[in-house]
Amino acid sequence: MHKIYEVDEIRTYIKRKDRLVWIVYALERETRKIISFHVGRRTNNTLNVVLKTVKFSNPLAVYTDKLKHYKYLLDAHVHKTKRFGTNHIERMNLSLRTHLKRLNRRTICFSRSQLVLQSVLKIYFWV
C-alpha cells in the first residue's frame, strides 16, 4: 500500500512482423518486482488491465512515459511524467530484450502464439 510504481510498454510481434503486440507491465520501484503484466494491442483496454492492479494498491505515484492514454486512465494527482521517472522500468525493458531472444528487435526468434509469449513472460517475471 502507498508505494511508487512505474508503468511502461514494450513492443514485439507474433508470427509475422505486421502482427504487433504490446507487453504492458507495472514495476514496484523500491523492490523492482513486476506486479502485473498484460499482452495485447496498444489500446486503453490493454493498459487498463495493468492500471487496475496499480490503482487497487492505492499508490503514492505512478510514473509513465508521455503516452497520451495514461493521461485519461490515471488520476492527475497520482500520474507523474518526470524526466527520469521511468529509469528502472526502461532498464528492465533492456534486460527483457537481452534475456528473452523472442523480444529482440532484429532476430529470427519469435513467438508463434500469444499464449506461449504470456507463458514465457510468467516464468520470467515470477520465478
Image: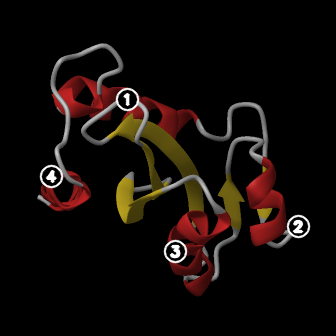
For this rendering, which residue is in front, 57 or 26?
A: 26
Q: Which residue is mark 2?
A: 76
> Quarter of the image containing the C terminus?
bottom left
Q: Nearer the viewer, mark 3 or mark 1?
A: 1
Q: Which mark is residue 120?
A: 4
Whether 99 is drawn above or below 56: the answer is above
Alpha carbon separation for disc pair 3 and 1? 25 Å
Which badge, 1 or 2, is on the more N-terminal residue?
1
For this rendering, which residue is in front, 117 or 62?
A: 117
Which badge, 2 or 3, is on the more N-terminal residue?
3
Looking at the picture, which amino acid does disc 4 mark?
Answer: Val
Which badge, 1 or 4, is on the more N-terminal residue?
1
* Residue 120 percent location from the top left of the image: 15, 52
Looking at the picture, which amino acid does disc 3 mark?
Answer: Val
Q: Do the residues under discs 1 and 2 have CB atoms within 8 angstroms? A: no
Looking at the picture, which amino acid does disc 2 mark?
Answer: Ala
